[in-house]
Image: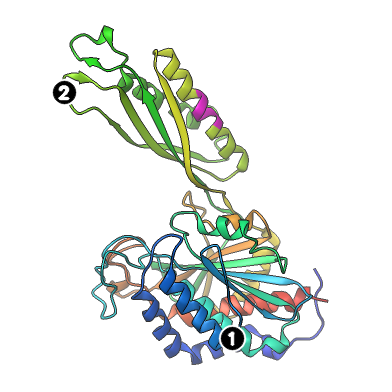
Amino acid sequence: MTQKRGKNAMLEMRRFYEEAQGLQEELVACRRALHQMPELGMELPRTTEFVCGELEALGLRPRRLAGGVTACIGKEGGKVFLLRGDMDALEMEEQSGLAFSAKGGNAHTCGHDIHTTMLLGAARLLKAHEEELPGQVKLMFQPGEESLQGAAAMVKAGILENPKVDAALALHVFPGAMHLGTVAWRQGPALASSDSFRIAVTGKAGHGAIPQNAVDPLNIAAHILLALQELNAREVDPQDPLVLTVCTLHAGQLHNSIPESAVLTGTIRAYSNHNRAFAKERLTQICQGMAALFRGSCQVEFLAGVASLLNEPELAAELAGYTGEIAARMEELPRQMGSEDFAEVSQGVPSVFMGIGAGGPEEIYNRAGSHHPAIVFNEGVIPLGAAVLAGCAAKWLENHCR
């Protein structure tokens, strides 16, 4: 790591935070506009149009990419720091009671409208200091985080290239107990990989009174379900966590009829790429073996998946050091078996994912958690988030560009 001697007062974290606080009214208005246009998945026409308009108003040249939007700020030819903000909402009717609540069947109940706003705020701060930046900041406004498709699609489309990205940062708001001013971080694995699976078991239909003339897919499915528990219990290192959960089992309609088929679905979560691959391989072997043992067959299908999210240790410590200059409190981000598709970025370049408090002691911030229709986020988090994004990018470039 190349450390520059002397400090650029224009690129200090405190300066970014002060400037972001001066933009609070405008940023809150931006967030509320986004909040009222929640869109799902990979196609977000109103949201991307809004983001492009905001970036163009700053004099930037946004480019649409794999359902998302990207733009660069700074000087070409140096190192590149990427900032990610996700834009998609969830399919549920909002019950927050806020005056600017979304209408209809979609709602921003995970805070992605705030993430998008914080990244737009960071763009404003960085553009104002573009001449002081010794490299480039690449903005990544991504779709489809909730479906775990958006980041992978943008990576495949080249978001990490042209210009080539050297490091990346993403923030995620957390309500409730994580109060305003708190930032949580950790080194190493932060969130698990996620792989959804579908197991279709085929037997032979028959009457429940004469099972010898049938091949019972429910019996096969039951044995598969029990056998899969051995993966967690006996086949993986308990110090390298793995979760394999069968969440649904559907078969038949009549109380006295053996159906022809049964379907199981579930999820696999792991921190290591080894456990992720091992669990998928063994799941397939166990299912096919059990089906054959009881005279049936099965087909295993893996649906949407995402890698584990790794916080590069040295980069995490560096960015946490910058963030600590303006955060009211720094704490450890608990390692979780939940997933986030920023992991696809972390598989390609050194990356950091941090949590930022959007709660408070007031009852309104504690009555519901993420993905709940009644959730309310503390909008006071927006200037801090914008400053953390802009400041970390600027300080990293200052200390790593020759």
Q: Examine the rendered structure and indicate whether residue 40 appears above or below residue 402.
A: above
Residue to which mark 2 is pinned: 255
The quadrant holding residue 197 is top left
Residue to which mark 1 is pinned: 125
Which amino acid type corresponds to the residue marked 1 in the rendered image?
Leu
The quadrant holding residue 326 is bottom right
Q: Examine the rendered structure and indicate whether residue 99 appears above or below residue 309.
A: below
The residue at 34%/24% (across/down) is: 222
Query: According to the image, what is the colour scheme of the structure?
Result: rainbow
Q: Are marks 2 and 1 in contact (CB under 8 Å)?
A: no
Q: Which quadrant, please, contains the N terminus?
A: bottom right
The residue at 56%/80% (across/down) is: 122
Label 1: element kind:
helix
Image position of 157 (left or right of 282): right
Label 2 crowd bin: few (<14), some (14–19), many (20+), radius 10 Å: few
Residue 5 percent coordinates (x, y): 82, 82
Label 2: element kind:
loop
Name of the residue lying farthest toward the left: 255
Q: What is the C-alpha distance between the residues marked 2 and 1?
A: 65 Å
Give the residues in magenta.
281-285
| Residue 100 appears in the figure | yes
Residue 305 percent coordinates (x, y): 51, 46
Is 109 one of the magenta-colored residues? Answer: no
Image position of 62 (left or right of 221): right
